[in-house]
Image: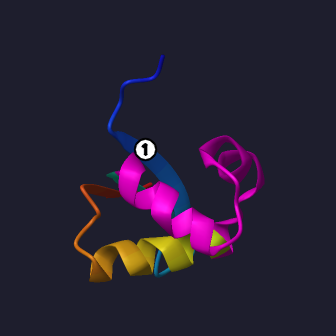
Amino acid sequence: MNIEKTIKLSTYGQKNEELKFEVSKTWLEIVIAEYGFEDLEEFLSEYTWDLSHEIFEYALEDNEVSVSLKI
């Protein structure tokens, strides 16, 4: 059983560098349902950097980003 409360995602940053960020699983489950995903497993196997960038921007607006690292 996975008891972690956050999930790490990757997207692109301002200069197309990789940007890793962490959000609450509960929050992400609500958001991905709005995009038509059935669950986290489906989302994690199919999401694109473009979609995760939208989610990152949304998470910033909602103050849901707990970690943000440029690689």
Q: Which residue is drawn at 66% across and 75% down?
A: 50
- In front here: 51 or 30? 30
Residue 10 at x, y percent in the picture: 53, 56
Asked if the magenta segment contains residue 30, the reply would be yes
Image color mode: rainbow
Residue 57 lies in quadrant: bottom left
* 39 relative to 17 in the view: left or right: right
**Residue 60 shown left or right of residue 18 in the figure:** left
Where residue 5 sits, quadrant-wise, is: top left
The number of callouts visible is 1
Residue at 44% across / 71% down in the picture?
Answer: 56
The vertical placement of 31 against 46, above or below, is below
Looking at the image, which residue is at 38% across and 59% down? 27
- Pinpoint residue 22: horizontal percent, then vertical percent: 36, 52
Q: Is residue 56 above or below residue 25?
A: below
In this rendered view, identify the residue nearer to me: 46 or 50: 46
Residue placed most toward the observer, 5 or 50: 5
Q: Mark 1 points at which residue?
A: 7
Magenta-colored segment: predominant secondary structure: helix
Boundaries of the magenta span: 24-50
Q: Residue 61 vs residue 46: left or right?
A: left
29 is within the stretch colored magenta:
yes
How packed is label 1: few (under 14 Cα within 10 Å), some, or many (20 or more)?
Answer: some
**Amino acid type at mark 1:** Ile
- Vertical order, 48 against 6 (above or below): below
Q: Quadrant of the C terminus?
A: bottom left
Residue 67 point in image, percent of width and height: 27, 54
* Residue 38, image x, y percentages: 70, 54
**Which residue lies at the image location 50% right of the left edge and 68% below the top edge?**
31
**Helix, strand or loop at disc 1?**
strand
State whether residue 59 appears in this view.
yes
